[in-house]
Amino acid sequence: MTTVNTLSRRTLMTGLAGAALIGAAGCSPAQQQSQQSATASASAITATITVRLWDEQVQKAYDASFAEFSKANPGITVKTSLVPWADYFTKLRTDVGGDTADDIFMMNGSYLQPYTSGSVIEIGSDFDALKSGWAQPAVEQYTLDGKLWGVPQLTDGGIALYYNKKLLNDAGITPEQLTGLVWAPGGGSDDTLLPILQKLTVDSSGKRGDESGFNGSKPKQWGYSAAQDLQGIYYNFIGSNGGQFQDETGKFVFAGAESVEAFQYIVDLINTYKVSPAASNTNDNGDFTRDQFLQGKIALFQSGVYNLKNVADGAKFEWGIAPLPAGPKGAVSVVNSVVVCGNAKSKSPEATTKVLQWLGSTQGASFIGSSGAALPAVTGAQAAFNEYWKSQNVDPSQFAKQGAMPAISAPAGENYGAAYGAWKPIFDEIFLGRTEVAEGLLKAQAAANKAAGS
């Protein structure tokens, strides 16, 4: 359990063993040699390299990192560009197809596969001296057919609960009561999560969710952040109930009995018990629950380390981090890492490689860690991340603990984007309560597999 002092700075995204996340990793002689090579004078190269990102907080860290890189490589200017997550992969597909993509671009594993046929460079022998310093789960996630297709940058441990200490106090709940919470399909006496969420939910007249006369259609605050959030919410429920979203071949199988139970539980939290915001607010706004938490209107916000900086900068109240609720199969979380890929059609391939080498070095990645914006997938830079949060009186180790536990694999596939586009409108109707869960999931599964060609 972590309790955090009030932080008043203003506010401004998918497994490692716990020790790997929270321990300082040394820099080997080979890494040092490669870092020196990456930062050596590049007077023979004159180029402007562009780097595309989707995260504003991380962009600030990259800008600082590239300023340092350019001091040692005066002929190379590096510029970042920000494309919002909602449009990122649609625009990337268009730009890669039209040969207008940036020299380097951030990549999520779910969308990688279509780009490995000539659109991105292999991370080959030029990076051998650095590879031992990269988080192994990230390397494995982005290795296809024996080839690595990106330089690891960010990694998540697992998912946990951010809590608002005042809202817990008002409901007579202690942070300690959040440890060991269990959800049960269909609720019942084995379910300890729902009663807590009901106590933390309040309507406009002051009635709590477990009190007679409670009117959930007129909310003042919600207990929980249930929403159509793959990484933060529904993947974790599926995994903790022993279900699958995709099988070993990549086929979508989320209409199985265990997954139906998981989705039904989430939908009931929203539409039956009304302990979470209506799907009309969250289906098309992935930041809604986070923003409501920061405004003091959600007591428990389930998310990952990728939102740690957002919470720390935006919360004007005392907050903390508690374990992920467990299901019948335990607390099973989704884990994910992010890489940067080199554009195979870059007009400055040598400079692009030098920038990628810098980003894969401890020195280059340390700017991400020291900003606290994200946990670096370059293990030597993780110490800077932990030192930053220690200086803020924040202990992020709960994410590391979850990351060391069993996990459900992040989604992937050559046509993942098309599959997502096929299931999303059906999921919208399920979360709105307008389509029955089991029926809707069967329809969405068939649509996703057809779109994916499986």
Image (tube, helix red, strand yellow):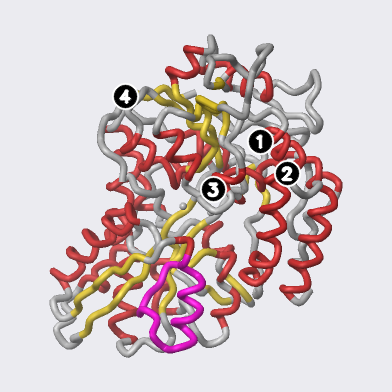
SS label for mark 3: loop
Q: Which residue in the protein does label 2 denote?
A: 433
Residue type of the residue flagged with mark 3: Leu
* Label 3 vs label 2, nearer the camera: 2
**C-beta proximity under 8 Å, tags 4 and 3:** no
Mark 1 neighbour class, 10 Å CA radius: few under 14, some 14 to 19, many 20 or more: many
Magenta-tinted stretch: 87-106
Q: Amino acid at mark 2?
A: Gly
Of discs 4 and 1, which sits in the foreground? 1
Q: Which mark is residue 6?
A: 4
Q: Mark 1 and 2 residues: CB-CB less than 8 Å, in contact?
A: yes
Q: Foreground mark, 4 or 3?
A: 4
For the residues bearing labels 1 and 3, Cβ distance under 8 angstroms: no
Q: Which residue is mark 1?
A: 270
Counting residues from the N terminus, which is met first, the one under dot 4 or under dot 2? Answer: 4
Element at label 1:
helix
Q: Which residue is mark 3?
A: 16
Secondary structure type for disc 4: loop
